[in-house]
Structures are given as structure tokens and as C-alpha cells.
Amino acid sequence: MVVEASLMLNTIYLYSLESQFERTICYGSKVDNINDVFHNGRTRLRSTFTRVNVYDDFFAVMYDGGKMYKELRLVKNNSKIFIFDWNGNPIAELNLPCLADVFDIDVRNGILLTLDRESETIRKYDIPEILKELNDSAVSASGPVGK
């Protein structure tokens, strides 16, 4: 399976190289039009999905809250992490209380790690309940389409 997350659009693409499976995941009520996003030039550009991490039973993407570039300066919002199964179904949304640029999930120990590059701060969050939900849904599912 391949996962592509758009840096300045509100879409995630999930598809198989071995079958006809393909899915578009949209954050919001409609898919962004690239011409509309770039219409106002650099000062109105925004960042959306910035990281994709893949795991055996799921993938996770970081959403930077639609960071905006105003007067060529970045305006940051607290990030979210969306977790999906390999069929593209949403499993969890983690609203981070602090800024983060990078994340990883230690599946075995139920830990989410984040890094804020600007402050050089690493944060650790315990998320065993969410990972248990993921494990339970993976056991009950028949497996990803096209795998």
C-alpha cells in the first residue's frame, strides 16, 4: 500500500500497487482546489498534512491545523494526529496540547512521542487505550483491501 499526504491540500491518497484499490481521504467538507489554494500567492499558503508514518496495522498522519503563512511568516497551530486503518477508515484523532513537528508511535509500549523543533522539546504521551482499539479493530477486520 502507498500513502500520500498533501502538504498544502486537505487530502490523503491511499492506493495499492498490486490491485485496483484506491481511496481519497478528505479533511473537511470538500476536496481543495489547487488553483484556489495558490490564487493569493505565497502569503496565503497553508500547511496541512506534514508527516506520514506507517505501521503494521495502521498509518498515521500529522495535520498542522492549516498553518498559514501571513506576510511570509508562519503562524502555527497545535497539531493533530489522525490514525487510519489500511482501508482508509478513521480510527482516532489525537489533538496535541502543544506544538509538534514530528511524531512517532511506539506501538509495543503504547507511547506517542512528539518533537517541537523550534523549542527542541520532546514530549511523551501514553496512548495504550487508543492502540488497544486499533488492535481490536485489526483482529475483527478481514485485513486491508488489496494486500
Image (cartoon, grey):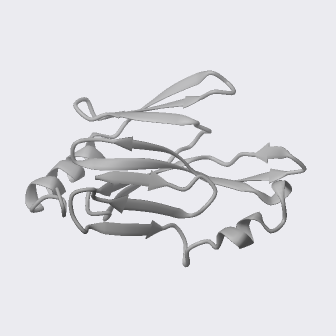
Residue furthest out toward the right: 71
In this rendering, would 137 be left or right of 84? left
Q: Would residue 80 be found to the left or right of residue 112 on screen?
A: right
Identify which residue is drawn at 27% across, 56% down.
Answer: 17
Q: Is residue 130 above or below residue 100?
A: below
Q: Quadrant of residue 89?
A: bottom left
- The quadrant in which the C terminus is found is bottom left
Q: What residue is shown at x 41% (from left), y 34% (from top)? A: 104
- Provide residue 84's location: percent of width, then percent of height: 33, 56
Instruction: Evaluate whether residue 66 shows in this view.
Output: no
Where, by quadrant of the figure, is residue 38 drawn?
bottom right
Asked whether 112 or 49 is in front, the reply is: 49
Residue extending farthest front:
18
User: On the rendered structure, is 5 left or right of 57?
Assistant: right
Q: Is residue 107 visible?
A: yes
- Measuring from the top left, give residue 78's x and y in whole percent: 62, 46
Tell which residue pokes out farthest to the bottom in this image.
29
Q: Position of residue 7 (x, y in %)?
A: 59, 52
